Amino acid sequence: MQQVVDINWWQILVFSLTLLVPFVINSYYKLNIGRDALIGLVRMTLQLALVGVYLEYLFYLNSLAINVIWLFVMIVVGSNAIVSKAKLPRYPLITFISMALVLGLFPIIALLSLAIIQPEPAYSAQYVTA
């Protein structure tokens, strides 16, 4: 039987203290990126909280179809982010970037899920989509 590791809120809070490091570096070297870092921190926290709520629901459903759709969405969003950050033309490259992500990630997900973790069922959302 598989066991789930429960992470307490205080452990998350203690780990979150590592986020102070960029602010200390910013202050020490006077980089003037504190505002951008704070906005990024708030945005990241909100995004992770919303994804956490969604993943809890996804784990509850544990549906192969929903898992495949979620993987597709993550690949499209990731490809979009890569193309946007590189400031490259979106439409000619998005398909190639998506294919590269699939080709790079599929063997890793398959190895972890099927050979190492071996969840029951094999498409368990807890391991395949997270």
Image (cartoon, rainbow, N blue to C red):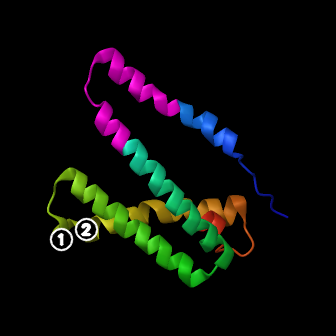
At a point 61% along the width and 61% down the height, the residue shown is 111
Asked if residue 117 shows in the view, the reply is yes
Specify the label residue 115 is tagged with.
none
The segment highlighted magenta reads: 18-39
For label 1, the crowd category at 10 Å Cα-Cα, with few meaning under 14, some 14 to 19 and many 20 or more, is few
Helix, strand or loop status at disc 2: helix
**Where in the figure is residue 20, as x and y percent of width and height?**
47, 28
What residue would you read off at disc 2? 94
What residue would you read off at disc 1? 91
Label 1 and label 2: CA atoms lie apart by 6 Å
Looking at this view, name the residue that lies furthest to the right: 1
* Image quadrant in which the N terminus is located: bottom right
Marks 1 and 2 in Cβ contact (< 8 Å): yes
Three-letter amino acid code at disc 1?
A: Tyr
**Where in the figure is residue 2, as x and y percent of width and height?**
80, 62
At a point 55% along the width and 31% down the height, the residue shown is 17
